[in-house]
Image (cartoon, rainbow, N blue to C red):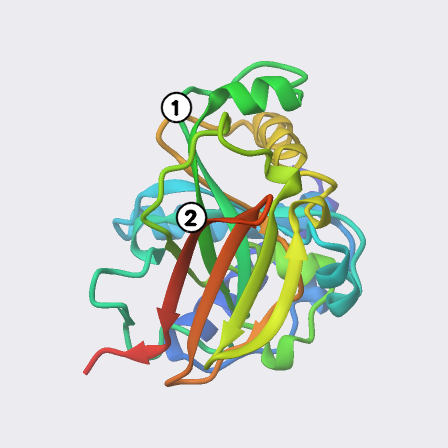
Amino acid sequence: MNANADVMTDSAQRAAARLETAAATAVPCAPVRDLIGRDDIALAYTVQRIGTERRLAAGATVVGRKIGLTSEAVQQQLGVHQPDFGVLFDDMEVGEDGRVPPGWLLQPKAEAELAFVLGADLDVEDVDVALARDAVEYATPALEIVDSRIANWDISFGDTVADNASSGMYVLGTQRLSLSEFSPRDVAMTMWIDGEVVSTGSGAACLGDPLNALAWLARTAREFGEPLRAGQVILSGALGPMVSLARGSVAEVEITADGRSLGTVRFRYEERA
């Protein structure tokens, strides 16, 4: 390994350690771009991989992926201009009691999405929308509770990628929707916080079609050596702007198509006693 590679490896390890400490102490940290740069995609994903390997070593299991920064509105909010992805672990799904472990969420925001559950692997080159669609067993409304270990959400593209694409937790609806019933790009979304409409959007806001996002993820994940597998949950990306979430607040999302409801999903942000 040459000297430059040694420096990059050390920088990635230091960035991963900074993020891990923030998560463990529930104290947001400084951005990691001083260590890895703002736009070094390969190095940012190296940091993410280090974090993933540490989670797996601690006993977590990968159950899927999340796609981030698919909505132009969210890209504008964060000042970035391309999608990214993160890893979903088994302990990130909100449980039946609807409460989260104390200190688990630092600076949460709610995003409304469509989730896809895969019925087949997506482990071939050049996955297009048709192949992605065929691999989906069902879709369901979802709330992603995005979060950042970085103080004040002061993030560049490199920061959010390194921080597992600013992942937090997620809530899936109970509905199992066949893609023969609706077109993901044609859905409409409304999100309420404590009964007030705070975000609206559509399937077209997610890279033009949530299936475009799924196809992009399938190609990208395979390039990184971790192709998408049957049974995995895929959060396909925000359908509209994300909104800050305070303790005690209730977030609710409804997804509709052609004027009919496809289902709702709800989350009350409370911590376990």
From this view, report whether residue 181 is shown above or below residue 199. above
Residue 119 badge: 1
Residue 222 higher or lower than 17, as above or below? above
Name the spot of residue 13 as percent of width and height, x first. 54, 57
The x and y percentages for residue 261 are 48, 50
Q: Which mark is residue 268?
A: none
The amino acid on which the numbered mark 2 sits, given as a three-letter code, is Leu
Task: Say left or right for 8 vs 137.
Answer: right
In the displayed structure image, the side of residue 56 where residue 43 appears, left or right = right
Of the residues under marks 1 and 2, which one precedes in the sequence? 2
Indicate left or right for 23 with 204 as reference. Answer: left
Q: Quick check: can you spot residue 198? A: yes
Badge 1 local density, few (<14 within 10 Å), some, or many (20+)? some
Q: Which residue is mark 2?
A: 88
For the point 67% across and 20% down, the residue is 128
Return the residue found at the far front. 259
* Quarter of the image that includes the N terminus: top right
Q: Amino acid at mark 1?
A: Gly
The answer to whether 162 is drawn above or below residue 204 in the figure is below
Say which residue appears at 20% left-offset and 67% top-offset.
97
| Relative depth, front residue between 261 and 77 | 261
